[in-house]
Amino acid sequence: MRKNELLTRDQNTILVVDDEEGIRSQLKWALADDYKILLAENADQAIDIIKSDMPNLVTLDITLSSNSDRDGLWVLEQIVKMSTRMKVIMITGNEEKEFIHKAINMGAYDYYKKPIDIDELKIIIKRALYIQRIELENETLSSRMREERHFDDIIGDCQQMQEVYSIIKRVLSTDVPVLIYGESGTGKELVARAIHYQSIRAKKPFIPINCGAIPENLLESELFGHEKGAFTGAYYQKKGKFELANEGTAFLDEIGELSPTLQVKLLRFLQEKEIERVGGKQPLQVNVRIVAATNKNLESEIQKQNFRPDLYYRLSVITITLPPLRDRNDDILLLANSFLNRYTKEYDKRIFHFDSLAVERMMTYKWLGNVRELENRVKRAVIMSTNNIISCEDLGLDDKVQQKNTTLVDIVDTVQRKHIDLALNRTKGNVSKAARELGISRVTLYDLIHRFNIKVNEYRKHNYQYS
């Protein structure tokens, strides 16, 4: 397969397409030490070589002299039809400025103006091949993960996500409650759905319940149901979410928002496996697996007496912590390309990839809304873009946005994270000693450890260094 050939080659191949023999010779001798160089002097030669050798990158003269209309833009059009992953750098003179914007919109990766400065061109080539390598590896990883895990909606291959997948696989054959920690937008409901739809309850209902979105005076009725006449407006009997989820899974999102009264009733349900509708007199047996999620530190909430410890221990038999996107740098492009492929198909748009600056900005952006924010930005860019390439402006990640999100909170978080890292490193994972060094309570440190998704066990295994 052509794509896999690009990944397995020992040396990247560059095709130089130019009608000037001097430029072909200049680039051949300048690049031959690092790359396999192929040469073409016209459009027909270029297409023949591309079909037979499928080079990684093409440097393409934008105005090839020819007796036909097959200029550089025509060659670019043919390349894009054959491969959206092949990188094309247009070589242009000052008099051809009007063609550059058209070439970029058609799918060219970048351009360079004559006279050629070899050192600058080498940097552009190196960056283009690096981006290509990441795109190809991410496609391969995405395909392999779909084959191996069957968790189609969860995307990621970083170490933290590997740990998540490992826990999911181990709990599939059990019926124990699972508690999922993670910031908003990290994919907690996707994990809950994966646990349900790969378990023995897969053919039964999956019922999501957002405990923070339903007013407290209505939530009890939503969870447990009510009898006709139980309260004003109760004109008919209503089954609650737990009853609807019988033999399936109930997903309790934002469990940390549950009121003390409902915490007691939920605890009783977990202990007795039965419910009682509001206004009802007969308990009803239900068989429901509970998966809960929160973006709060429940241990800290227990210390503040906002959450019952006995309920916490019932819910947290198994815990899964989802990392924020800013700690999943290796997954950002993988996710972005997945969303790009999804929405170009959904909205029937011909968009090939992200430009180099968009990739750089995505890799350094804070992503306070995590995966949900990334997906929404890519979706909006696909809908609104009039070009074939997504730019950082299309994503709303221009310099103004970057500066706006570098806030004082971000700076404080970075400093806190670094000093906690160093303290745990010095104490080899002893939280009590680290807290004393930092001059804070053990509870506060645990709160920060959870907030920054710090793996304390890693400090106990070896002498970890901050980076």
Image: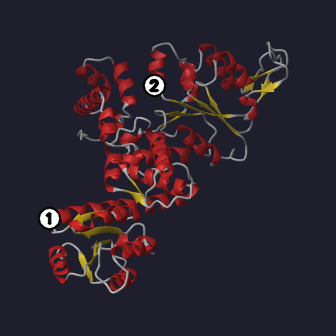
Q: Quadrant of residue 463?
A: top left
| Residue position marked by numbered label 2 in the rendering | 297
Going by the numbered disc 1, the residue's amino acid type is: Asp
Tag 2–tag 1 contact (CB < 8 Å): no
Q: Quarter of the image containing the N terminus? A: bottom left
Give x and y (percent) for residue 355.
Answer: 35, 56
Give x and y (percent) for residue 128.
Answer: 29, 62
Q: Quarter of the image containing the C terminus? A: top left
- Please say if 312 is above or below 81: above
Going by the numbered disc 2, the residue's amino acid type is: Asn
Label 2: how many Cα within 10 Å (few below 14, some 14–19, many 20+): some
Residue in the picture at 69% in, 44% down: 201
Q: Nearer the viewer, residue 362 or 34?
A: 362
| Residue position marked by numbered label 1 in the rendering | 119
Distance from the alpha carbon under mark 2 to that under mark 1: 52 Å
Residue 237 appears in the picture as rendered: yes
